[in-house]
Image: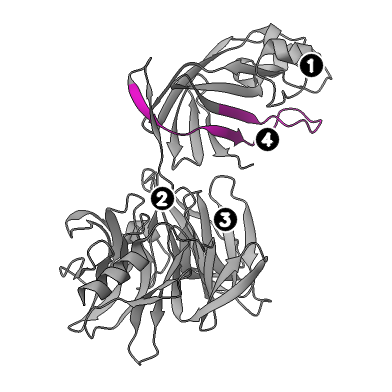
Amino acid sequence: MRFFLFLLVLAYNCQAQTLTFNLAFQRADKIFVFDEKANKAVSVIQGNDACLSPDGSKIAYTSNTTGTRKVVAYSLDTKKHLTINVGNHTSYAPVWSPDGNYLAFQTFVDGVWYTGLFSFVDQSFRLLTRAHESYAPSWAADSKRILVQDMNKLYIYERNGQLVKNYNLGPITKDYSTSSDSKFILTPDEQFLLFTADAFDAAGMPVGAVFMYNLKTSALTRLSPKGMSCTGDLFLNNQNELFFCGSYDHEKEENIHKLDLITKKMTTVIRNGRNPSARLTSNETIAAATDTENNNKYPSYVGTYEYINNFPFNKKGIKENHYIVLWKEDGRITGLYFGPSTDFEEATEEVPEGHPHIPGFFVTNMRDLVIDDNKISFGLTVSEADLFTKPISLKITSTDEAKSAGYKHWNFQIESHTNKYTGQFKLGQTLVLWDEIKGAERAFRKMEY
């Protein structure tokens, strides 16, 4: 018996799975994964409430083959099943912790719905709390806290059952209606709550919509388009991409959509599908290196980050995007900043009358660069000699290289020559940067090559 249990633990905790997928969803009573190589959806098992593990190698789902709903973990690589033992209690709708070590799900005990927790670390099961009924669990990004609701309040618990905080739902949902199926998701920066609720259309009929609540300002924003009816199926990956289900009146099936919370761009990713869940892409071990000059440690945020400026000053279609390139050199982190001159000038005063404003473009070293944990600070120094008439290629590393490559000088003055910036990395994929001089905020996204 001990040997059999060891095999189960090995099969469901091994990190070296060879077969992984990036998206799972449900269609009718079957669970599908999207095979990117074949560019098609593949049915893998019968069940409901599919939730893909953070590493994309397993699916937790609800099985109802015996007449009692049970939570099952299924390996996409070995095709093995593990039924989560919770006694004879009905259980459904499992959700993986971001570290892949736990499942939270609904379970019915002594006539009350509670949140159950199963640990893959020691194969144990327990209830999160018996203090009140609880519905629709979701995880905080640290895998240590769980959000549940009882239709009156939203609760945040430590994994050990210790209550951290609670909110009255009324001020959050305002005039919109939620149910026991309404899942509230806390964004990784812990500034927003995402959820679905019933709004009302022009005819006064309730229509599901996706909302975002700002915990600091109490502002409530509708994210899903008007005219689209959305269900309670929400999933947020660690690239600030929200997956949800919705359909318009003329559509016969629900479709799965992906909304970028930074750019607000929405795309349809799966036709005829629901219950989306996605692989978390930054689950690799983050290396740490010692910055001897600043005497601190920083995670490996090496890469190229892009800020897309959707409202450029010029009218000629020239992109005014900003780029940050970070790399390791001699045991410390170094960076280049590419951008337009608008951070250093009052542009319109220096432009001849009737001439459309086109900023200058530069590449410069990030001075006094400090990365401490997930925070970043640096300064920029730019002179008129550093400015050119078109965006600088990311292959260029200095003003001298730009001159040698044939870039033409920009012939206007700038108001200032230095600027300071502070910011924060969000799960290694997003860098939110604050311009301390002008008070502007920019969200950079890590580019993939």
Observer-side mark, 2 or 1, equals: 1
The kind of secondary structure element at disc 3 is strand
- Residue that label 2 marks: 187
Picture coordinates of residue 182 (x, y %)?
Answer: 39, 68
Q: Report how far apart the C-alphas of labels 3 and 2 lie in the structure.
A: 14 Å
> Magenta span covers which residues?
296-325
The kind of secondary structure element at disc 4 is loop
Q: Report how far apart the C-alphas of labels 3 and 1 lie in the structure.
A: 38 Å
Q: Report how far apart the C-alphas of labels 1 and 4 lie in the structure.
A: 24 Å
- Residue that label 3 marks: 259
Q: Is residue 424 above or below residue 282?
A: above
Observer-side mark, 1 or 4, equals: 1
- Image side of residue 37 versus residue 47, left or right: right
Would you call the spot at circle 3 few (<14 residues within 10 Å), some (14-19), or many (20 or more)?
Answer: some
Sooner in the amino-acid sequence: mark 3 or mark 1: 3
Q: Is residue 151 visible?
A: no
Sooner in the amino-acid sequence: mark 1 or mark 4: 4
At 68% from the left edge and 35% from the top edge, which residue is drawn? 311
- Residue that label 4 marks: 311
